[in-house]
Amino acid sequence: MKIVQIQFTPWDKVYNFDPADSVLSVGDYAVVKTELGVEIGKVVGFKEAKNEEESEKTELKPILRKATLTDLEKISDKKQKKEALQYCKKLADQYKLPMKLVDAHFSFDGSRVTFAFVADGRVDFRELVKDLTRRFNRTIRLQQIGIRDEAKISGDCGHCGCPLCCKRFLTELSSVTSEMAELQQVAHRGSDRISGICGRLMCCLNYEEAGYEECAKKLPPMGAKVDVDGKKGVVVRHHTLKQAVSVEFKGENGDGKTIVEVDLNRNKK
């Protein structure tokens, strides 16, 4: 079974739909029916259900149609979103709410407005919602997003000099851990040099993880005892990309030590 992946806003997750009889390509817009109402979203990818049993359990909602020019004209313009966001920010300041508004989304069917915000903790915005409901005469939703999602909306340039990956092509933000930085031997550079503008570890640490893992499998483990030119030593450091290790040799009388870098490919032709 073919599954269509659709995203409604840059800061929301990707949803799966049944293409039904629609013929779609990545980048097309489609009109779908969700639990909240009729929406229009962008096709960001496709995937296949792993097996028939999974297909039956999924029970995906069907796509109503590929968006027409008339449908696309109904999408709220930047001016409308900007005015709504400014009004919401003004109210949030009046109520002294500890939140940062970053985006506004008008639903395709016109029934609701969703405001995305960033905050360190929970925010009591009940009074804010009441005022917004009176102002827009629609259902109001406030959705808290992460700081990485904010960077995805605003965009910028990364350390590489290119526009942020999350702004260009990443549809889902995967978890990035400190273990990845350690595996790629960049943790010693400090958090400032391996973090993006969002303050979190750079997403590109995900890209080379598999390659580093494959290279690391070819190296003897840390602490392993090895024989180098007839001398016994212990592996104390990996040089993953160079396919080399640092080996520590003790002095003949047990005092003093010498550390030598050994190229594991030195005897290979």
Image (cartoon, rainbow, N blue to C red):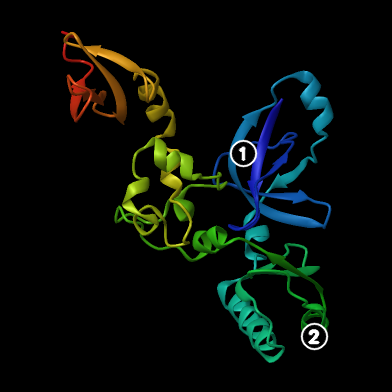
Q: Is residue 235 left or right of residue 77?
A: left
Q: Where is 250 relative to 39, above or below?
A: above
- Secondary structure at numbered mark 2: helix
Question: Which residue carries the number 1 mark?
Answer: 24
Q: Is residue 250 left or right of residue 146?
A: left
Q: Amino acid at mark 2?
A: Asp
Q: Amino acid at mark 1?
A: Leu
Of mark 2 and mark 1, the one earlier in the sequence is 1
Question: Which residue carries the number 2 mark?
Answer: 131
C-alpha span from label 2 to label 1 = 40 Å
Give the residue at x 48% y 66%.
Answer: 154
Whether residue 166 appears in this view of the structure is yes
- Secondary structure at numbered mark 1: loop
Per the rendering, the mark at residue 144 is none
Percent position of residue 83, x then y: 62, 82
Give the residue at x 78% y 26%.
Answer: 55
